[in-house]
Image: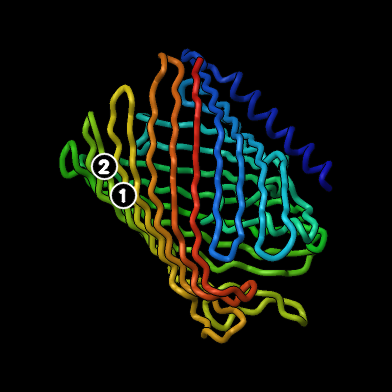
Amino acid sequence: MRQKTLAYMFILLLGAVYIFLNVKTAAAYDLSLQTGFQLDWWKDDKDSKAVQAHIPVKIEARQGDYSLSLLAGYASTHVEPSHGENRTLSHLLDTKVNFSYAITDRMPVDMLIGLDLNLPTGKTDFVQEELALIMDPDLISINTFGEGFNVNPTVSVVRDWGVWTAGLGVGYLWRGEYDFSRNVQDYDPGDVVNATVEVRYYFSPAWNSRFFGAYAWYGKDTVEGEDFAQPGRHYLFGAGLYYDRTRWNAGLTVKTVLRDKSKFQETSGGLFTEDSNGHGREFAGDLAYLLNDKTALNASLRGLYITDNDYPEGSSRFVGARGKAELGLGVSRRICRNLRYEVNVKGFVMHDEETNFPETRDARDFTGLSTVMKLTTSF
C-alpha cells in the first residue's frame, strides 16, 4: 500500500514540475531559497521539560502567474518527563509541495487556484514509548512528525469595490491512510472540507479594518476499516484593525474558535456523539508592531485563553481552562540585493488548570522560549 502511494506521489510531483517548466510565458524564472534554524524549549513546575531543534528548507520558483514551492525539514525532539524515561526522536519531516496559478485583471474577480501535496517522508508507526514526543502545539512548533499522502486543491477569489475588498476561499483535503502507531495500524483520517471568508475596509490610505471567518467539516477517522472518531465542525470568527505607513505599521487582531461536539467509537461498533462538548471556547489576541527600514524591527504580544470544557469537574473527560501570554521581538535586514536574514525570539508563560483527559493531571505552569533564524536568497 505504501509503495503504491509513493508511486502516485512522485507521478503527481513530476507532473506538476513538467507543467510548470513548460508554461509559455515571457516572464523569467524567479528562484528563492530559504533555510534557517529554530530552537524551541519549555519546562513546567512539575520538572518536565523538552527541547526541539528544527531545520527547514524551502525552494520556490515563480514564472509569471505560476508558482511552485517545496518545503522540507528535519527535526530533533527531546522530552524529559517528570515521571518516566527520556525520549529523543531525530527524523525528516513530511515534504510539502504547492503549485498555484493566479488569474488577475482578466475577470470581474481575481482568482488563485492551488494544489497542495503532503509527501510522507516523515516519521509514523510510533512505538508506545515514542508517543510522549507528540506534544501540545501551544508548547512546541513541530507536533506532527508525519502523515500519509495528502492532496488539497483550493480555490480563492478576491474582489475590490473602492474602499472595500472581499475574499472567499474553499478547499478539500483528501488525507491518505498510514500507520499512526504500532497499536493503531491502517489509520485513515477523515477528509476535510474548509472555507474562509474575509472583508477589508480602508478608512484611509493608512487605516484599514479586517473581518474574517473560517469553517471546517471533518469526515470520519477509521482504523482498519472501522469507524474510530469524527471531530466536530470548527468555526472561527475574527476582526482586526491595522495602521500601515511607509516607515512603520501596527495591527491588532482578535479571534475566537468554536467547536461542535465530537463523535467517538462505541464498544459495540459505530460512533456516538459525546454527552457534552469536549472542547472549550478559544479566544486569542495579537498585537504586532513593525518598524520598516533597511533594518526592520518587529515586536508582538499574543494572548490565548481557552475555557474549560462542558463536562463537570469530576468527569473523566473534563479539561480545565488554559491561559497563555507570549512576547516576541525580532529583526530582519537585507545584507545585499539577493540576501536577507531574520532573527526572532519569543518567550511565553502558560497556565493549565486541573485536567482529567486524556489523563489526570494537576494544574501546571509552563515557561518557554523559541528562537528562529532565517536566511533567504534569490536568483
Do we see residue 118 in this rendering? yes
Q: Which residue carries the number 1 mark?
A: 287
Q: How is the image coloured?
A: rainbow
Q: Position of residue 358 (x, y in %)?
A: 64, 72
Front residue (pair 316, 117): 316
Badge 1 density bin: few <14, some 14–19, many ≥20, Cα 10 Å: some
Relative placement, left or right, of 330 versus 58 is left
Do we see residue 282 in this rendering? no
> Height in image: 9 above or below 176?
above
Disc 2, SS: strand
- Name the amino acid type tagged 1: Leu
**How many numbered discs sit on the rendered protein?**
2
Residue 14 marker: none
**Does label 1 or label 2 sit earlier along the sequence?**
2
Identify the residue shown where x is 49% and y is 13%.
Answer: 28
Relative placement, left or right, of 308 versus 141 is left
Quarter location, residue 284:
bottom left
Q: Where is residue 145 in the image (x, y as percent from the top left)?
A: 67, 48
Q: Where is residue 326 in the image (x, y as percent from the top left)?
A: 40, 52
Q: Are marks 1 and 2 in contact (CB under 8 Å)?
A: yes
Q: Which residue carries the number 2 mark?
A: 250
Residue occupying the far left of the picture: 204
> Height in image: 171 above or below 259?
above
Disc 1, SS: strand
Cα distance, mark 1 to mark 2?
8 Å
Quarter location, residue 95:
top right
- Name the amino acid type tagged 2: Ala
Identify the residue shown where x is 76% and y is 38%.
Answer: 8
Badge 2 density bin: few <14, some 14–19, many ≥20, Cα 10 Å: some
Q: Where is residue 130 in the image (x, y as percent from the top left)?
A: 75, 56
Front residue (pair 320, 275): 320
